[in-house]
Image: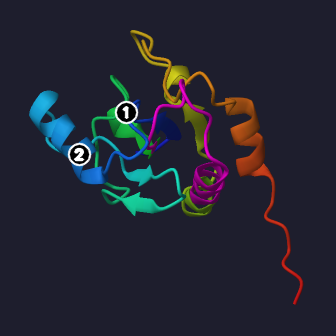
Amino acid sequence: MITRLVLHHAAGPENQTPEQIARFHVEQRDWPGIAYHYLIAPDGTAYKCWPTTTVTWCVANGNSSSLCVCLIGNRSLLSCPPAQWEAAVELFRDLLVALPDRAVFGHREVPTTPPQNTQCPGTLIDLMAFRRDVRTPREEVPA
């Protein structure tokens, strides 16, 4: 059962494609498929990779309870582009409508034994700000 929504970064180039990420996971990591349920490109394009009911390989010792969203690019080298940030916030808001009361984590924060040994979703991601933006209600659009 999904108990948490987890934000990741691919830690790769800004122009990496979903296909390249999937190929890396399968060919280099020997995983059964891409590790994330969703990918978000720097331009804000969101890609659905798996149904939310699919268990992926995105959080060591926590896969079955995690739904994972990955920002394409390396968020330890470059700040998150505004379009990517906004798309991630919107996706997490939508996921929380479908899966209310789930916790929002950055990959490095997920409590597992042993602890996650990663800087993911990148040292330039302010996770407190991300959670604040996700939990802030959408502004009403005037008619």
* Residue 20 appears in the picture as rendered: yes
Q: What is the CA distance from the residue labelled 1 to the residue labelled 2?
A: 10 Å
Q: Give the extent of the magenta segment.
A: 71-91
Q: Give amino acid for label 2.
A: Gln
Please say if the residues under marks 1 and 2 sit with CB atoms less than 8 Å apart. Answer: yes
Residue 61's spot in the image, x, y percent?
33, 23
Secondary structure state at the residue bearing disc 1: loop
Identify which residue, 67 or 72, lies in the foreground.
72
Residue 84, compared with residue 31, is above or below; it is below
Q: Which mark is residue 12?
A: 1
Identify which residue, 27 or 95, lies in the foreground.
27
Secondary structure state at the residue bearing disc 2: helix
Judge left or right: residue 119 versus residue 26: right
* Residue ID at (71%, 40%): 131
Label located before the other in sequence (1 or 2): 1
Residue 114's spot in the image, x, y percent?
39, 9
* Residue ID at (29%, 40%): 35
Identify which residue, 61 or 76, lies in the foreground.
76
Judge left or right: residue 116 versus residue 101: left
Judge left or right: residue 113 versus residue 54: right
Residue 105, compared with residue 71, is above or below; it is above
* Residue 30 appears in the picture as rendered: no
Q: Give amino acid for label 1.
A: Gly
